[in-house]
Image: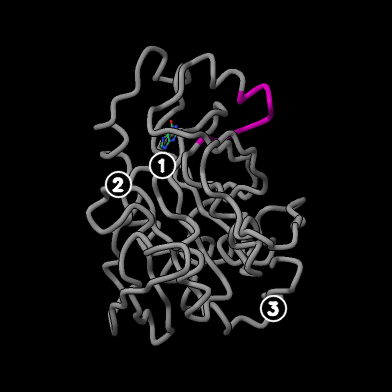
């Protein structure tokens, strides 16, 4: 079963025919909102808004473990995530869509593993390729099927937030090799991997990162929201296509265990 996790600017899927809303309790607490079960083009999908229905949960307070655990408990094997970012590379202006292939994690003090219970054996997951290549290919194929251009590589810097970065921090991230910056990519991706769930994200660029492009001296939050309003309709259409294609396209290699 496929799940969509929506981020800033995507707290609901207008084109989802909702069949059920389910409050789920997990050993890690409650997810950000009840799981929304529904259908797009007769294909089942679960939707979850990472920041809650009213967008009230900041990135560092999202209960990522409860979110991923709840989806896992309900049979989710693939998570297609939407995560808004700032563009670090000069070509990544607002409105661009990036499917990153790598992550650098700068977050701290987040509960970032399921393997830290008392008496639990230590476990180290492989995370060489943090995003599932097959699911990244599905995102790309879905976008291209509706003539949306995507940049199908990128290094996602996950920052702690909730504040935006300083210009010097962005220069540092750039030096590290990051091309986009966001606050929610981790530990979400790693937790999905721990539970064997394939995970890949599409990242709508909402603004140039601090000190970049036209944001030399400041980033205005209203600018982020205005840009996202313009972009999310396109993302919704890509999601609809992704759900529609999922499981039907013989060219798409079935998800292999390496993704999970
Ligand atoms: N930095 C971090 N997260 C973001 C940004 C940004 O510039 N824009 C949207 N999410």
* Image quarter (top left, top right, bottom left or bottom right) of the C terminus: bottom right
Residue 75 to residue 138: above or below: below
Q: Secondary structure at mark 3?
A: loop
Q: Residue furthest front?
A: 119
Residue 41 occupies quadrant? bottom left
205 vs 125, left or right, is: left
Could you say where residue 182 lies in the image, as x and y percent from the top left? 48, 38
205 vs 170, left or right, is: left
Q: Residue at x 26, y 67 (%)?
A: 14
Q: CA distance from mark 3 to mark 2?
A: 33 Å
Q: Secondary structure at mark 2?
A: helix
Is 178 covered by the magenta stretch?
A: yes
Numbered badge on residue 95:
1
Residue 46 to residue 125: above or below: below
Q: Which residue is mark 2?
A: 230
| Scheme by which the image is coloured | one colour
Q: Which residues are magenta?
A: 173-181
Q: CA distance from mark 1 to mark 3?
A: 30 Å
Q: Which residue is mark 3?
A: 254
Circle 2/circle 1 CB separation < 8 Å: yes
Q: CA distance from mark 2 to mark 1?
A: 8 Å
Mark 2 CB lies closer than 8 A to ligand 1: no
**Quadrant location of ligand 1?**
top left
Q: Nearer the viewer, mark 3 or mark 2?
A: 3
Q: Nearer the viewer, mark 1 or mark 3?
A: 3
Label 1 crowd bin: few (<14), some (14–19), many (20+), radius 10 Å: some
Residue 67 occupies quadrant? bottom left
Could you say where residue 243 lies in the image, as x and y percent from the top left? 47, 75
């Amino acid at each position: 079963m496929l799940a969509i996790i929506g981020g800033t600017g995507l707290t609901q899927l207008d084109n989802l025919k909702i069949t059920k809303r389910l409050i789920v309790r997990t050993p890690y607490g409650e997810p950000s909102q009840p799981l929304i079960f529904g259908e797009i083009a007769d294909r089942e999908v679960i939707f979850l808004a990472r920041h809650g229905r009213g967008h009230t949960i900041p990135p560092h307070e999202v209960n990522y473990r409860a979110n991923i655990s709840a989806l896992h408990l309900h049979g989710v094997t693939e998570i297609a995530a939407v995560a808004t970012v700032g563009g670090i590379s000069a070509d990544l202006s607002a409105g661009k869509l990036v499917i990153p292939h790598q992550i650098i994690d700068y977050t701290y003090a987040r509960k970032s593993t399921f393997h830290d219970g008392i008496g639990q054996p230590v476990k180290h997951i492989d995370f060489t390729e943090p995003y599932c290549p097959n699911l990244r290919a599905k995102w790309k194929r879905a976008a291209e099927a509706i003539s949306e251009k995507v940049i199908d590589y990128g290094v996602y810097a996950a920052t702690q937030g909730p504040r935006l970065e300083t210009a010097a921090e962005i220069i540092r991230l750039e030096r590290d090799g990051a091309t986009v910056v966001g606050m929610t990519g981790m530990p979400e991706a790693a937790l999905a991997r721990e539970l064997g769930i394939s995970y890949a994200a599409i990242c709508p660029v909402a603004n140039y990162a601090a000190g970049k492009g036209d944001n030399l001296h400041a980033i205005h939050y209203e600018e982020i929201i205005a840009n996202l309003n313009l972009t999310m309709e396109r993302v919704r259409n890509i999601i609809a296509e992704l759900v529609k294609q999922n499981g039907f396209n013989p060219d798409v290699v079935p998800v292999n265990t390496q993704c999970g």
